[in-house]
Amino acid sequence: MKRWIGGWAVAACFCLVTTQVRAGDMSVRSFDRFEFDTVNARGLWAEVATAATHDEPHAVSVDAQTVEPRLVYGGELAEGGIFIPYHFISVEQHAFYGTSYGTSSNEEDGIGDIRLYGKLVPLRTHYLDAGLGLELSFPSGDEYKGLGTGEVGFLPYGMAAAHLGPVDVRGHFGYQTYADSNRSFNGFSTVELAPDSFVYGGGLFGVVNDYVGLRAEFVAQTFDAAQNNTHVLFFEPGLDVRIPLGSVDLFVRPTGAVGLTHDSPEWGVGGAISLAWNPSAG
């Protein structure tokens, strides 16, 4: 599936660059990197996002699902919010026993690490937006079940967007670090449960009209683990559909994902249902 990414990216980019941007209430937000957008909510944004990934490294099959309520409030220059993820993880391991194969499985579910963020976008011009933000994560997930990191995390980041006619080109870069080094002894060596990492990505975001927006994102994270570096990279095409409901807007945001590196899950699907209320609209 990863070899199809070139065609997916070309098709998505072609759709974006042929759109005609119109002024209105439509805004396109990142799905996976919502808090890294230069776009701010102009009031209250309440969303439930879901995502599922699948991977089969060696003789192991890993399926992970996340349901994440998001509550955000913002204005022209600033935005802040809270994300509360709940994870479902299923692992099947296949092994050869003598003359036959056997399968062992393990399932875990529970709340993940809760995240709070705030950002400021002081630079807003006709051609460029730029700002800074900080995300804090709290060890509410069980790290030994793979549901959290077990440490307080700090993620300072910067983001920018260039307005190029029919599309925005957005990018972000940050560094995730933790209050302490959390290691587990597995009988032979220590394993770092919460390695520091670079968090970065970008993409094209276009508005077709007041009701439909398109996005083609690349999201990446490089973990600086003691044993070796791990590079996770996804291509995530998506669609935002706005449905006006009187004083609020309903957004439907389906998303796909294709892993581009050996360390990435093979594929994923996701989506979100959002309600946006702008108290100054009328």
Image: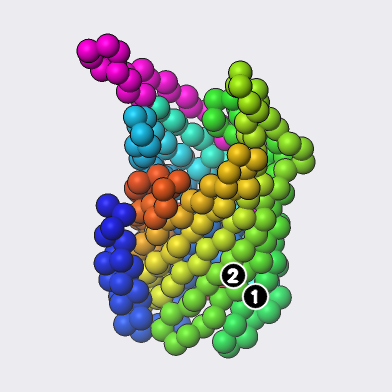
Left or right of 24 on screen, residue 60: left
122 vs 146: above or below: below
Residue 5 sits in quarter: bottom left
Label 2: which secondary element = loop
Residue 273 visible, this orientation? no
Residue 248 numbered mark, or none:
none
186 horizontally vs 212: left or right: right
Is the magenta region chiefly helix, strand or loop? strand
Q: Position of residue 120 (x, y in %)?
A: 70, 67
Of residue 221 and residue 215, the one placed in the foreground of this image is 221
User: Of the residues shown, which amino acid type is indicated by label 1?
Assistant: Ala
Mark 1 or 2 closer to N-term?
2
Q: Which mark is residue 38?
A: 2
* Image x and y of residue 114, in percent: 63, 40
Q: Position of residue 244 (x, y in %)?
A: 40, 65
Residues at circles 1 and 2 in contact by the CB criterion of under 8 Å: yes
